Image (cartoon, rainbow, N blue to C red):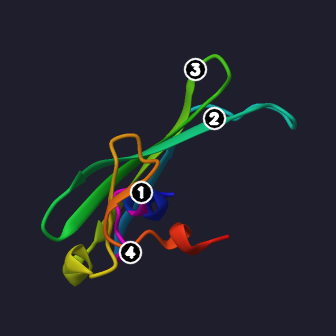
Amino acid sequence: MGSLAVATKGQWMTGVSTDINAAFLKPGGKLGDTVFMECRVVGIGANMAYTRTEFRDKTGLLLAYGSHTKFLGKTINHPKNVKFSEDGESVIEGEDLEADVD
């Protein structure tokens, strides 16, 4: 999920994983129970991206969390990177790949 979170920031290529960590705090429930997951980018620097993922039950209780560190290197300036609008719904800089879809 860390790579997808980095991609939401407009990265065409999401680099190479340098660290993946997971901590399991509580059982996830029984078969059929709903578990909610949220993954977000904590920061992107000149060469590295940092993400955090959380899993919660329907009451909001934290079940597990993890982090994912990505080395971006030269991908940070890839010509196919884009910039999204504040709501993330449209490309405001770079090529919109969905613009050509009928």
**1 or 2: mark nearer the eye:** 1
Q: Which residue is mark 3?
A: 60
Element class at badge 1: loop
Q: Which residue is nearer to you in this view: 82 or 46?
A: 82
Q: Amino acid at mark 3?
A: Gly
Residue annotated with mark 2:
36
- Mark 3: few/some/many CA within 10 Å (<14, 14-19, 20+): few
What residue is shown at x 44% (from left), y 64% (from top)?
A: 3
- Label 4: which residue? 12
Residue 67 falls left or right of residue 97: left
Q: Quadrant of residue 78?
A: bottom left
Please state which of the two labelled residues, at mark 4 or mark 2, is closer to the viewer. 4
Q: Nearer the viewer, mark 3 or mark 4?
A: 4
Q: Is residue 24 visible?
A: no
User: Where's residue 55, x and y in %?
Assistant: 57, 37
- Horizontal side of residue 46 vs 64, given as left or right: left
Mark 1 — residue?
8
What secondary structure is marked by label 3? loop
* Residue type at numbered disc 4: Trp
Tell me whether the residue at label 4 lies in contact with that at label 2, contact meaning CB atoms closer than 8 angstroms.
Answer: no
Q: Residue furthest left?
A: 46
Mark 1–mark 2 distance (CA, rounded to whole Å): 19 Å
| Span colored in magenta | 7-15
Q: Would you say residue 9 sits in the magenta stretch? A: yes
For label 2, count other residues whose C-alpha is less than 10 Å away and answer few (under 14), some (14-19) or many (20+).
Answer: few
Marks 4/1: CA–CA distance:
9 Å
At label 1, counting other C-alpha atoms closer than 10 Å, the crowd grade (few under 14, some 14-19, many 20 or more) is: some
Q: Is residue 40 above or below residue 20?
A: above
Q: Is residue 25 magenta?
A: no
Taking depth in this image into account, of 15 and 31 the one nearest to the observer is 15
* Of pointers 1 and 3, the one earlier in the residue sequence: 1
In space, the residues marked 4 and 2 are separated at their CA atoms by 27 Å
